[in-house]
Amino acid sequence: MSQQCEQDTNTASPRIAVLGCGGWGKNITKTLARVHEVAAVADPSESARALASEIAPGARVASDPMDLINDPSIDAVMIATPAETHHDLARAAMHAGKDVFVEKPITIDTDEAVKLRDLAGALDRILMVGHLLEYHPAILKLRELIDNGELGDIWYAVSNRTNLGKFRTFENALWSFAPHDISVLLRLIGEDPEQIVCTGGDYLSKDIADVTVTQMKFPGGARAHIFVSWLHPFKEQKLVVVGSKKMATFDDVARELVLHETGVDWQEGQPIPVKSDGVQVEYDTTAPLDLEVLHFVNAVRTHTQPLTDAHEGVRVLRILHTAQESLVKNGAPVDMSPTINITTQEAVGAR
């Protein structure tokens, strides 16, 4: 297991509640029950509460999340409710003295996300965003290879995330799928993009893009491309990173991380392709959600900032909004706007 995701067992065990036991919330609840413990679960749905009692026996179950937020025995909450509720719940929890994990996206509105980020700093609270792919052992291994200089300078990266369904009617494929890839690409490339182009098509529901292609241009010269679709004949989750020394491919469906020599030779001033089968790189097989949940538990226990903190959540949200602007403009290039900054006093005063 990655050292940065390991638990520290030398300090008190935090009492953690889960807000939301629906589609993804039930997975968080199951995982937290297995790797730590669940103090309580809240969900307005009677069937979700029944499921919570089944998968987290012994946990307190409530219908109103505010009952758990206001419970002084709860140290932290993990929020897996609809995105439009993230801001109010996270803000209330931090004001109540809780550390917070919130599923992606951190919020829908960038200004609200910045206020949450600054509120966490002002109140000295942990605010972690659920960018699950960053905790995948293969991605952690790929980061290690890049940090050690194995790939050389990163030239470009391509990420494909496709499947047939689950079709959404309240958010498009960009917002549903791309946050995972954006967060990973920012980490691997090591800087924010300066310009974004995004195109897509809506075929099932008007103005809800079923497929999008996002291109990011980085100040250092790197490029990245993200293709996402839920209207595709097969499932694909593949990342390709091309560097000046080596290339890496990660196929999450096949569960393979492969390192290739950069396939270019020069003869008489002309580039000649050199093909190779590549070498498989071994990586830990621990489930990414296990590592993510343990990372949050450890952050709360030791009061240390998580890998995917609120700053990361704001960065990803700004890119999503910029890509959405380009999408609405039918693929017109959009420059990233200057970083929004909210003062500490403004953040603390936002009730």
Image: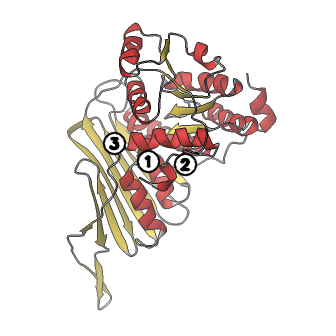
In the image, residue 228 sits, relative to residue 19, either above or below, namely below
The single residue placed furthest to the front in the displayed view is 10
Kind of residue at disc 2? Leu
Estimate the spatial distance between the alpha carbons at disc 1 and disc 3, rounded to whole Å. 20 Å
What residue is shown at x 56% (from left), y 16% (from top)? 65
Mark 3 is on which residue type? Val
Residue, disc 1: 135
Residue occupied by mark 3: 228
Give x and y (percent) for residue 23.
37, 24
Q: CA distance from mark 3 to mark 2?
A: 25 Å
Q: Residue at x 69, y 27 (%)?
A: 97
Query: Which residue type carries mark 1?
Result: Tyr
Drawn side of residue 14 relative to residue 46, left or right: right
Vertical position of residue 80 compared to residue 263: above or below = above
Residue 276 sits in quarter: bottom left
Residue 314 in the image, given as x and y percentages of width and height:
59, 41
Which of the two discs, 2 and 1, labels the residue nearer the N terminus? Answer: 1
191 sits left or right of 250 in the view: right
Residue nearest the viewer, comparing 194 with 158: 158
The one of 327 and 158 positioned closer to us in this rendering: 158
* In contact (CB < 8 Å): disc 2 and disc 1: yes
